[in-house]
Image: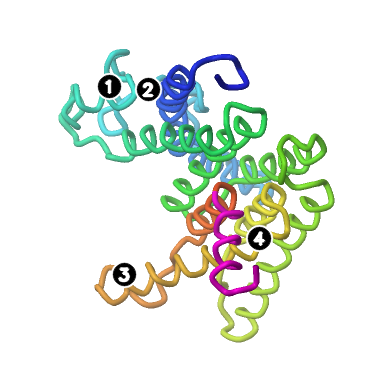
Amino acid sequence: MTLIGLPPVFVYGAAIVIGLVIGSFLNVVILRLPAMMETRWREDAADILDMAEPDDTGARFDLATPGSHCPHCRAPIKPWHNLPVLGYFLLRGRCDACGTRISLQYPAIEIAAAALAVIAIARFGATGWGLCMVGVSWLLLTLAAIDFRTQLLPDALTLPLLWAGLVASLFHLAPGAPTPSDAIIGAAAGYGVLWIVFQGFRLATGKIGMGHGDFKLAAALGAWIGWAQLPLALLAASLGGAIVGGLLIASGRLSRGTPMPFGPWLVFGGWLALVAGDTILHAYLTLSGLR
């Protein structure tokens, strides 16, 4: 039995179902939040420059409105076609109205959200800390997908993630969870290390190597994993980005000088440290003879 009093089969079943449903909502956030940000930027720019407001049809656009629709023909999506994963296969990957191919992102994010929930519960149990890890994993998935698509890391997601990590550290939800001092130092170090790398790269090359959103994401990760796991997260992120970037350049799929978002790799390194940092550190110390 788990701490919430249900057999594991029910807990994991619930994690899968809830993960699929949440994944469907995450797709909405991934697609709409950047568009909402751009609309706000245009309005702010028009106000600052005393220009005419951008054309506005008066239609409301946010995470809830309008309802789900095809981005190509704007036909409303039927409720049964909106079912996570199943709807994609019912439609055979194409819009029911216009036949436009539906992006694989939709089922991929839904499946990933369910898988992350199962992994977090399996690793940490159906506990307060385990549920926190589920939520953190979903937020990280959302940030990685947004940065991959748009090279944006919205403050609306990174800053709540940072503050939630700092607040969670006050409650010591699990053995080994960061203490308040661990979380504060981790957040400061995460931001500071990437800021130093950013400044050094700019001085050496005259170019901008990363965005400030990466600093904030690293700070948020530092708050959740603590300063001791931060080197692992940053090392994994750097190696992952360098290896994949090198392979893409070698294969001709990415040209030199083309920006590649670093956020997905920070997410990879941070999530790896969250779920397996202690295991990796123990294995390293054992193999190196330090333990």
Marks 3 and 1 sit apart, C-alpha to C-alpha, by: 37 Å
Q: Amino acid at mark 3?
A: Leu
Nearer the observer: mark 3 or 2; the answer is 3
Marks 2 and 4 sit apart, C-alpha to C-alpha, by: 39 Å
Marks 2 and 1 sit apart, C-alpha to C-alpha, by: 9 Å
* Residue 84 on image: x %, y %: 34, 24
Tell me whether the residue at label 2 lies in contact with that at label 1, contact meaning CB atoms closer than 8 angstroms: no
Q: Which residue is mark 2?
A: 68
Name the residue rendered at 52%, 46% in the picture: 143
Q: Which residue is mark 3?
A: 248
Tell me whether the residue at label 4 lies in contact with that at label 1, contact meaning CB atoms closer than 8 angstroms: no
Q: Residues within 10 Å of mark 1 (few under 14, many from 20)?
A: some
Q: Identify the mark at residue 230; answer none if there is no mark.
A: 4
Q: Secondary structure at mark 1?
A: loop
Q: Is residue 286 magenta?
A: yes
Q: Picture quarter containing residue 2? A: top right
Name the residue rendered at 44%, 72% in the picture: 242
Nearer the observer: mark 4 or 1; the answer is 4
The residues colored magenta run 276-291
Depth order, front residue of 76/289 = 289
Name the N-terminal-most of marks 4 and 3: 4
* Residue 250 on image: x %, y %: 28, 77
Q: Is residue 35 left or right of residue 256?
A: right
Q: Quadrant of the N terminus?
A: top right
Nearer the observer: mark 3 or 1; the answer is 3
Q: Is residue 9 left or right of residue 179?
A: left
Marks 3 and 2 sit apart, C-alpha to C-alpha, by: 34 Å
Q: Secondary structure at mark 3?
A: helix
Q: Which residue is mark 1?
A: 75
Depth order, front residue of 284/291 = 291
Number of marks drawn:
4
